[in-house]
C-alpha cells in the first residue's frame, strides 16, 4: 500500500489555520499568547483575544489593499510580532505567505520572487528598497517595520477593519518556505493549512506540550525547527510564546528565568554558544527539543527531558522522534513517529539489511503530513518520490541494534572516487580530531581519472602553525583512511563560508575547489 493511500478523511475538516487561532481565543481569551522580548526598545504582550483581533485587522488591511485568496505575500522578516501575525492574517484571507530567510541578499530575493510571484511584501525598513529594486515585477505595495522608507507603507498602516473569517478549506495553500540549498536555485516548498494543523497537533502530542508551557523562541521562524517544532505546538495547546528577534547566548538565561520558560528548541550552534555562558542554579525548563541526542546538555543544565527529532522542510513535522525517556543512544536521531512510514533503502529502492547504511525514505500524505509540492516544479516534485510514494530524503542513515536510527551523512556528501563511495563526514571526523583544527569541510573536486577526489578546507586554531597542522592532518589521514579516501588537496581558510542558520556552504566550497579559486 502506498503511503498516500492512507489519506482518508481529513482530521482537520471544518477548520483552517486562522480559525484555529479564533478557537483558542474563544476558549482562553485573556491568556498570554505572544510576548515580544527585543534586546532594545519596549516589549509587548498579546493575549489570545488581542492576537486574534490583530490578525483579523491585519487581514482586513491587506484585503483593502487588494490582496485576494490565492495571492502571495512575501514576508521577509527576522523574528518579530508581524512575522507571526502576518502569516495568520494571510491564512485568514486565503492568501499564501511566502517566508524568506531574513539574511537573503537582493539577488537571492529576486530568485525567490521569480519562483513565487508575490503581489506584495512585508519587510524591514532596510530591506524594503532592496525588495523593490530586485522584484522581477513591480509589487502592489511594500509595508515596512520601523521607520518606513520612501515608497513603503508603515506596517501599522496595514491594520484595518477586521476581516470576516472565510469558509475553511484545510487543503488550501497556506505557506511557502524555501529549502536551505547550497547549490543551484532554491526549491519553494508549499504547505497547506492542513500541513500547519498537522505540525501543530502532532508536535504537541508527541512532545507532550502543556497549556501552561512558556516557549522561549529564538530560532528563525522561517525554518521548521523554530516554527513547526516549537511555536505551532505551543499555540495548539494554548501556551505562551516568548519571541526574540534572534538568538543571543548572553540573553538566553536571563530571559528564560524572567519569563519562567519551560520549553525551547535548540540546534548545535546555540548549544555550543550556551556552553560558554554561566547557567543559573535553578530554572523552569522541563523540555528541550534538539535534532540529535545530546546527553551532556541534559546533565549540564539539569533539563528533565531533552528530546531528539529529525525533520526537514518537506516533512512539515518530525517523522523521527527520540525516546521520551531519553534512552535513545547518544548521537542517534530516534525512531519512526506517528503518522509516517519510514524505510531505509539502497540505490535501487530496496530495503537494506538491519545495520546497513542506506537512504532514509519517508512516506506520508501530501498536503497533510508532508508538503504539497515544489512550487512551479512538478517534475522535481514527482522525482522526489519513489515508485512506492516514499519521499527520498537524501540522508544516509542506519538502524542500530536497539532500533534507533542514526544519521550518517548526506548522499550529496558521498564522493565517488574511482567508483568507490567516500563519506565526506568520515574524512571530516578524522581531520577534526587533529590538534590545531578549528573547523573542516570536505567537498568533491572533478578528476579526469577518478571521477572525483576529496578536497578538505580547514580553519586552523589561533596561534597554531599552519604548515605543522597540514602535516599532522596528512599523517592522520594516511594512518586512518584508505588511500582513495585521503584528501587530494588541503586548503587553509580564515573561515568556512555558511548559508542559512550556520549551514556550511558546500556548494560554494565545491565551486572553489573545482575552479581553484581563492576564498574571499
Image: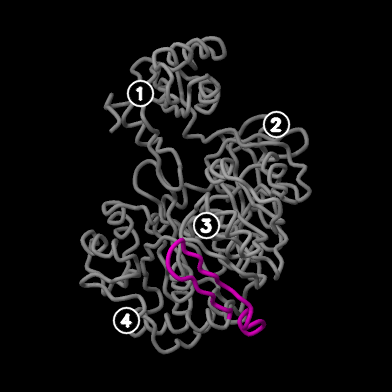
Depth check, front residue: 460 or 198? 460
The answer to whether marks 3 and 1 mark residues whose Cβ atoms lie closer than 8 Å is: no
Circle 3: is it few (<14), some (14-19), or many (20+) Cα within 10 Å? many
233 in magenta: no
Pair 3/2: label in front: 3
Alpha carbon separation for disc pair 3 and 2: 40 Å
Provide residue 178's location: percent of width, then percent of height: 42, 54
Q: Which mark is residue 432?
A: none
The crowding category of the residue bearing disc 2, from other C-alpha atoms within 10 Å (few below 14, some 14 to 19, many at least 20), is: few
Q: Residues within 10 Å of mark 1 (few under 14, many from 20)?
A: some
**Residue ID for mark 1:** 446
Q: Which residues are drawn in magenta?
A: 24-48
Q: Which residue is mark 2?
A: 353
User: In terms of secondary structure, where does tag 3 sit?
Assistant: loop
Q: Does residue 74 show up? A: yes
Q: Which residue is mark 4?
A: 66
Secondary structure type for disc 4? loop
Residue 417: x %, y % from top left: 45, 19
Amino acid at each position: 500500500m502506498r503511503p498516500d493511500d492512507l489519506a482518508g478523511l481529513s482530521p482537520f475538516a471544518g477548520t483552517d489555520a486562522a480559525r484555529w487561532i479564533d478557537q483558542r481565543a474563544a476558549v482562553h481569551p485573556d491568556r498570554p499568547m505572544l510576548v515580544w522580548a527585543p534586546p532594545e526598545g519596549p516589549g509587548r504582550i498579546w493575549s489570545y483575544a488581542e492576537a486574534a483581533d490583530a490578525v483579523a485587522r491585519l487581514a482586513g488591511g491587506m484585503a483593502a489593499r487588494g490582496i485576494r485568496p490565492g495571492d502571495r505575500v512575501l514576508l521577509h522578516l527576522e523574528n518579530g510580532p508581524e512575522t507571526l501575525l502576518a502569516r495568520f492574517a494571510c491564512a485568514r484571507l486565503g492568501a499564501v505567505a511566502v517566508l524568506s530567510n531574513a539574511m537573503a541578499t537582493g539577488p537571492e530575493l529576486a530568485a525567490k520572487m521569480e519562483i513565487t510571484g508575490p503581489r506584495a511584501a512585508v519587510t524591514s525598513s532596510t530591506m524594503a528598497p532592496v525588495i523593490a529594486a530586485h522584484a522581477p515585477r513591480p509589487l502592489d505595495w511594500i509595508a515596512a517595520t520601523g521607520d518606513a522608507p520612501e515608497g513603503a507603507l508603515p506596517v501599522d498602516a496595514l491594520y484595518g477593519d477586521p476581516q470576516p473569517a472565510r469558509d475553511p478549506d484545510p487543503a488550501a495553500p497556506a505557506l511557502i518556505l524555501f529549502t536551505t540549498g547550497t547549490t543551484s536555485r532554491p526549491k519553494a516548498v508549499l504547505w497547506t493549512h492542513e500541513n500547519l494543523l498537522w505540525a501543530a497537533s502532532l508536535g504537541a502530542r508527541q512532545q507532550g506540550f502543556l497549556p501552561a508551557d512558556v516557549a522561549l523562541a529564538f530560532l528563525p521562524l522561517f525554518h521548521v525547527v523554530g516554527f513547526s517544532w516549537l511555536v505551532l505546538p505551543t499555540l495548539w495547546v494554548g501556551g505562551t510564546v516568548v519571541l526574540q528577534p534572534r538568538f543571543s547566548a548572553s540573553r538566553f538565561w536571563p530571559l528564560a528565568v524572567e519569563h519562567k520558560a519551560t520549553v525551547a528548541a535548540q540546534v548545535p550552534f546555540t548549544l555550543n554558544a550556551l556552553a560558554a555562558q554561566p547557567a543559573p542554579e535553578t530554572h523552569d525548563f522541563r523540555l528541550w527539543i534538539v535534532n540529535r541526542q545530546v546527553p551532556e546538555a541534559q546533565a549540564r543544565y539539569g533539563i528533565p527531558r531533552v528530546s531528539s527529532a529529525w525533520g526537514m522542510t518537506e516533512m512539515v513535522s518530525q517523522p523521527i522522534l527520540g525516546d521520551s525517556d531519553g534512552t535513545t543512544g547518544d548521537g542517534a536521531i530516534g525512531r519512526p513517529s506517528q503518522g509516517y512510514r519510514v524505510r531505509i533503502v539502497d540505490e535501487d529502492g530496496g530495503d537494506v539489511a538491519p545495520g546497513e547504511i542506506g537512504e532514509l525514505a519517508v512516506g506520508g500524505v501530501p498536503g497533510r503530513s508532508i508538503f504539497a509540492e515544489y512550487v512551479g516544479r512538478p517534475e522535481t516534485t514527482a522525482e522526489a518520490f519513489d515508485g512506492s510514494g516514499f519521499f527520498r530524503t537524501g540522508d544516509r542513515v542506519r538502524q542500530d541494534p536497539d532500533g534507533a536510527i542514526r544519521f550518517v551523512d548526506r548522499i550529496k556528501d558521498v564522493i565517488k572516487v574511482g567508483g568507490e563511495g567516500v563519506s565526506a563526514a568520515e574524512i571530516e571526523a578524522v581531520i577534526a580530531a587533529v590538534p590545531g583544527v578549528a573547523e573542516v569541510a570536505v567537498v568533491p573536486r572533478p578528476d579526469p581519472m577518478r571521477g572525483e577526489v576529496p578536497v578538505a578546507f580547514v580553519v586552523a586554531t589561533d596561534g597554531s602553525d599552519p604548515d605543522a597542522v597540514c602535516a599532522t592532518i596528512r599523517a592522520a589521514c594516511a594512518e586512518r583512511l584508505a588511500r582513495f579516501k585521503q584528501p587530494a588537496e588541503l586548503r587553509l581558510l580564515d573561515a568556512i563560508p555558511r548559508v542559512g542558520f550556520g549551514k556550511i556552504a558546500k556548494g560554494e566550497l565545491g565551486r572553489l575547489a573545482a575552479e581553484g579559486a581563492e576564498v574571499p
